[in-house]
Amino acid sequence: MSGAPFLRRWATVVSERFPPVAHVALIGAFFAGNAPDVVRGGGTGALHAAAAAAATLLVFFRMRVFDEIKDHATDVRLHPERPLARRLVSVREAKTVAFSVAAVEGLLAAACGASAFTVWTGVLAFTLLMYREFFLGTWLRPRMELYAVTHTFVVVGIGAFVAVAAGGAHGLDTVLLAAAAGNWAVFNDFEFARKTFAPEEEKPGIETYSLRWGPRGAVTLTMANVAVAAAAMLWTARASVAPLCAAAVVLFAVAVAVPYLLAPRAGSAAFYRRGMGVFLFGYYVLLAVAPRSAGGGG
């Protein structure tokens, strides 16, 4: 393991595996989309919103560290340049950091009230199951699509935490359920797209959706979830703007996918992957700024 100081080593881990600018932008949009009242100066108040936002960011960071630990054995073979694989930090240290972060999350969640803390404990439990791959890792890993959609389900809980801790939601209603479906679908889109490549980009030993399904099949996986996200948008946005929001979501996804479908090369594949990252960001910005349908757990 490197002898560099702790903070310097972890600054490197963060810069390489959790780039701050991109993640703060995406998680900030997710936060705003799940607690749009905060954007309009409402919700549970500035202090609760700040604590909830910090806890949300830390949950995503902790999940990234958990993934680094889970993938360590594979990364040693296939991605030796990654921080744990090259022994910049040890697996033991990564576990210590991850569980220390979880403790800070808990304190922040508790500061947001009993209801928020209760939802956070559910999120924590689910992320711990993810960390252990639901105790089905040997069976689940070869089933790449099922692995993805079971793991992305965590954002349903994180979105609920944001809605309760910062947005002041309480109880379930159809708008919150639709928002939950949208969260799950959008993160499925992001997951499917980020592991979709052109034929010349595929590497031996690394499973991708494009390798398993071909370019058309991989995009079909994404577009099925785009349809779910658009339906969620129709339900969560006020009727007067909902069709425009849903149409914008679908048209943008199609626009970034078509060049890859027509010519599946490295450039168009990279455009598709980046475009679906922008799709995630834009989806939540629309949710944050569009007038909300009646409901929302209030």
Image (tube, rainbow, N blue to C red):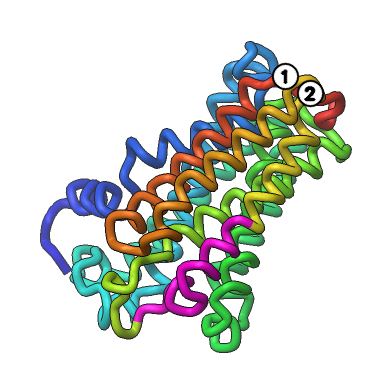
**Left or right of residue 164, residue 74 in this image:** left
Q: Hey, what amino acid is under mark 1? A: Pro
Q: Hey, what amino acid is under mark 2? A: Arg
**Left or right of residue 104, residue 291 in this image:** right
Q: Which residue is mark 1?
A: 291
How many C-alpha atoms fall within 10 Å of the one at disc 1: few (<14), some, or many (≥20)? Answer: some
Q: Looking at the image, can residue 203 be seen?
A: yes
Q: What residue is shown at x 33% (from left), y 40% (from top)?
A: 20
The percent position of residue 168, horizontal first and vertical second, equals 75, 26
Q: Which quadrant of the figure has residue 76? A: bottom left
**Left or right of residue 63, residue 286 in this image:** right
In magenta stretch: residue 75:
no
28 or 194, which is in the foreground? 194
User: Which disc number belongs to residue 238?
Assistant: 2
Q: Looking at the image, can residue 120 be seen?
A: no
The percent position of residue 204, horizontal first and vertical second, equals 30, 84
Secondary structure type for disc 1: loop
In what quadrant of the picture does the N terminus appear? Answer: bottom left
**Mark 1 or mark 2, which has the lower sequence index?**
2
**Left or right of residue 284, residue 274 in this image:** left
Instruction: Report the span colored magenta.
Output: 206-223
